[in-house]
Amino acid sequence: MQHMLTEYGMGTSLRRGDYTQAAKRALQNALWHNSINLAELFDLPKEAMRIAVDVAVQRPDAVDLAGLEEVFPYGQVTFKLSQGGLDIPRPEGHGNPTVIAHVSLSVSLDMERVS
């Protein structure tokens, strides 16, 4: 496998304290700003892409991976959850915090198939 590209994103859940939604928005932030046809560039099917996703939030146990998988229409995706991101308490001191998630995604291809 040859590492081909890395993208980063940030997403938030402003009022609901939803770690999955914040992570999903971070993934969309990383993906939606680009239109890279990496697999097609090497005449490979999109399904051949291996995508390693790192998600950082304050409560990794509160992230539903099935919800994050929905973001990817193709590719072989793996997830790693870590403590990170940021929870910002409400100014009035009660209610859900604003949740900030950070993600990194790395795309790899089997370049042996191209030769």
Image: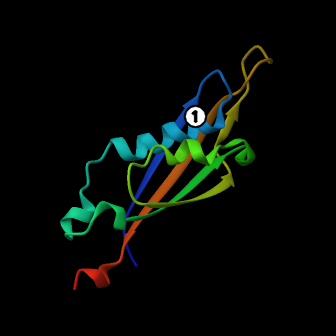
Of residues 94 and 73, which is closer to you in this image?
Answer: 73
Residue positioned 68% across, 28% down in the render:
17
The image quarter in which residue 97 lies: top right
- Location of residue 86 by image quarter: top right
Q: Residues within 10 Å of mark 1 (few under 14, many from 20)?
A: many
Left or right: 74 in relation to 37: right
* Residue under the image location 45 percent in, 51 percent down: 8
Residue at the disc numbered 1:
21
> Looking at the picture, how far across and down is residue 16, in whole percent?
66, 23
Looking at the picture, does residue 88 appear above or below residue 41?
Answer: above
What's the amino acid at mark 1? Gln
Secondary structure found at label 1: helix
Q: How is the image coloured?
A: rainbow
Whole-percent x and y of residue 104?
50, 55
Q: Is residue 87 left or right of residue 106?
A: right
Q: Left or right: 2 with respect to 97?
A: left
Q: Point out the residue furthest to the top here.
A: 92
Q: Is residue 75 above or below residue 27?
A: below
Question: Does residue 19 appear to the left or right of 54 in the view shown?
Answer: right
Of residues 101 and 19, which is closer to you in this image? 19
Residue 100's spot in the image, x, y percent? 60, 36
